[in-house]
Image (spheres, rainbow, N blue to C red):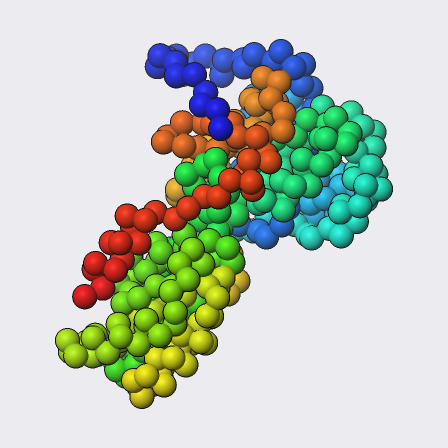
């Protein structure tokens, strides 16, 4: 991961046009697509790419339905008015799809030829690690410069503090937890709530702390499901009327396994609530809109600077470049301090 150089703050005259960004790579036209699972804020990133391009004299081509649409030639030119009034919308106006054909060299060759036919100088891919794999192969096999923008609610990509969609997913899950806590307390019932996170517990951990959960299970920690029994028993002894247990979907024991262990160990009534894809939808919160806008702009500048095969991320408030292969080869761990905090505050 490479940090961009720190520059002195500049004072702009707001009556002057936006300064031209250097373009040593000679970029004249870029394509942008969204791929994999949708994430709130993807539209804000697309908007930022299109409008940054317009400001810098770079044409932007939108690709519909991700890599699947790319090899079928589903492309269209986009201008500033085409992305008006989308920053607040969830999902992605470009649509997204899983592409089986892109997994073959023939499928990627077809996509590369489509980009050449459209005179595209570089491709911006908004998605997660699977999407970055596809982008990496396209560049390696056909020499088309690619830039990745981290769009995945799981927040599991190395090279950025947060990914687009993560903040909204946490808020959506937390809203559900608050509602379930109300009914759980009324019925003196234990709710075991499954949130997304197949390989990472970032959502689960944040929701557990913000929602005041008694216990949290994440893929990074292989503690047995029986540990929830002791926690619930202790909560009951202290007079709690209901308990909330958060489980990431990637935890080996599963939400149902945790609930079954609690019922068997305590005899208390337990309910399982799987939030599922509701966490992907909805209007993005401000943090996701700002992050997406910043990274979309940075992706265009990266291509103009001659960058290729990197993901633009935000780390400690600054823009960073991380080689695409490092985003999946290096593991992004959860905050161990936050994990400790969750356990400490569950008493």
Residue placed at 73% from the left, 35% from the top?
Answer: 138
Residue placed at 49% from the left, 50% from the top?
Answer: 153
The C terminus sits in image quarter: bottom left
User: Considering depth in this image, is 340 or 25 the residue closer to the camera?
Assistant: 340
| Residue 179 location (% of width, % of height) | 33, 70
Looking at this view, name the residue that lies furthest to the left.
238
In the figure, 67 relative to 209: above or below?
above
In the figure, 86 relative to 312: above or below?
below
Whether residue 262 appears in this view of the structure is: yes
Whether residue 80 appears in this view of the structure is: no
Give the side of residue 213 with respect to residue 100, left or right.
Answer: left
| Residue 106 location (% of width, % of height) | 84, 42
Give the side of residue 215 with respect to residue 69, left or right.
Answer: left
In the figure, 50 relative to 72: above or below?
above
| Residue 35 location (% of width, % of height) | 64, 46
Looking at this view, name the residue that lies furthest to the bottom.
267
User: Considering depth in this image, is 53 or 156 the residue closer to the camera?
Assistant: 156
Residue placed at 41% from the left, 38% from the top?
Answer: 161
* Tag count: 0
Give the side of residue 311 with respect to residue 338, left or right.
Answer: right
| Residue 262 location (% of width, % of height) | 34, 80
- Residue 175 location, quadrant: bottom left
- Residue 81 location, quadrant: top right
Residue placed at 49% from the left, 16% from the top?
Answer: 18
């Amino acid at each position: 991961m490479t940090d961009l150089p720190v520059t002195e703050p500049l004072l702009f005259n707001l009556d002057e046009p936006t300064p031209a960004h250097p373009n040593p790579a000679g970029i004249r036209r870029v394509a942008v697509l969204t791929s994999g699972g949708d994430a709130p804020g993807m539209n804000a990133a697309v908007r930022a790419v299109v409008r940054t391009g317009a400001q810098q004299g770079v044409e932007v081509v939108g690709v519909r339905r991700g890599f699947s649409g790319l090899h079928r030639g589903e492309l269209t030119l986009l201008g500033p008015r085409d992305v008006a009034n989308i920053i607040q919308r969830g999902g992605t106006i470009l649509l997204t799809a899983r592409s089986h054909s892109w997994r073959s060299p023939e499928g990627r060759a077809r996509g590369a030829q489509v980009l050449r036919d459209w005179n595209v100088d570089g491709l911006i891919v908004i998605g997660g690690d699977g999407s970055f794999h596809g982008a990496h192969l396209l560049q390696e096999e056909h020499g088309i410069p690619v830039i990745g923008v981290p769009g995945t609610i799981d927040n599991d990509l190395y090279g950025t503090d947060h990914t687009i969609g993560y903040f909204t997913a946490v808020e959506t899950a937390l809203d559900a937890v608050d509602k379930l806590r109300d009914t759980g307390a009324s019925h003196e019932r234990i709710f075991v709530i499954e949130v997304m996170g197949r390989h990472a517990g970032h959502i689960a951990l944040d929701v557990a702390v913000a929602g005041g959960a008694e216990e949290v299970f994440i893929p990074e920690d292989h503690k047995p499901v029986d540990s929830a029994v002791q926690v619930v028993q202790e909560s009951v002894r202290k007079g709690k009327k209901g308990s909330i247990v958060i489980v990431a979907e990637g935890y080996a024991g599963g939400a149902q396994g945790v609930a079954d262990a609690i019922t068997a160990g305590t005899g208390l009534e337990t309910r399982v609530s799987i939030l599922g894809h509701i966490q992907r939808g909805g209007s993005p919160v401000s943090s996701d809109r700002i992050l997406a806008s910043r990274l979309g702009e940075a992706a265009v500048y990266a291509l103009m600077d001659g960058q290729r095969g990197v993901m633009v991320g935000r780390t400690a408030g600054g823009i960073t470049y991380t080689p695409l292969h490092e985003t999946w080869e290096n593991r992004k761990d959860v905050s161990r301090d936050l994990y400790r905090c969750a356990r400490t505050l569950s008493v």
